[in-house]
Amino acid sequence: MQQPNILRTAFSEEQIKSRVAEMGAAITADYAGKDLALIAVLRGSLYFFADLTRAISMPVQTDCIAIGTYAHSSSGVVRITKDLDISITGRHVLIVEDIVRTGLTLGYLIQNIETRGPASVKVCALFVNPAQHLIDIPIAYQGFTVSSAWLMGYGMDVGEQWRHLPYVVEVEKNPPHAK
């Protein structure tokens, strides 16, 4: 795959590392002495999730969940394609997302998680675009506010590639080779 047209570096590796460390310290302080389960929303959050868990200086249990749309459907209906392996009943749950745009998928996920009897459910997102929110999703821990730009790197992909970049770049919107 040809590299997308990079318009600018949106967030450097140093900016991301610094902000993730701050978020980890805040989570550690807020959940001290509590039974915390961190849930990564696959696949985009994996790099952020790994760095965030290392920035939290208390024991946590981790798991992953994946959300997808029904094949060959434009209905916007979502489903869980990979469910949790751990029990979250009575535990504090922190859902970790790479980016929150409309909030619709995250809203579905929060409702689903809440049916499992956790002590609490909160959201941690590295990037949030409030201008695109269609529903109000409270974000307890937010890294950066972003625009509607097409972003790539640090877990975010174009055509399932370029997630590995340790920084985030803005690329040409809707590149022809993107999925």
Image (cartoon, rainbow, N blue to C red):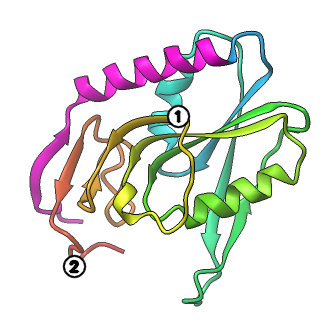
- Report the residue marked by disc 1: 49
Q: In the figure, 163 relative to 38: above or below?
A: below
Q: Which residues are magenta?
A: 1-30
Q: Amino acid at mark 2?
A: Pro
Instruction: Describe residue 82's horizontal placement relative to residue 71 as left or right.
Output: right
- Please identify, in this view, whether the residue under mark 1 or under mark 2 is nearer the observer: 1
Q: In the figure, 48 relative to 149: above or below?
A: above
Q: Tell which of 112 and 59 is nearer to you.
A: 112
Instruction: Describe residue 108's horizontal placement relative to residue 167 as left or right.
Output: right
Q: Quadrant of the N terminus?
A: bottom left
Q: Position of residue 104 (x, y in %)?
A: 57, 67
Local secondary structure at mark 2: loop
Q: Amino acid at mark 1?
A: Phe
Q: Main secondary structure of the magenta part?
A: helix
Indicate which disc residue 176 carries.
2
**Residue at left offset 64%, top offset 60%:** 107
Q: Position of residue 102 (x, y in %)?
A: 47, 65
**Residue at left offset 60%, top offset 58%:** 106
Asked whether the viewer can see residue 125, the reply is yes
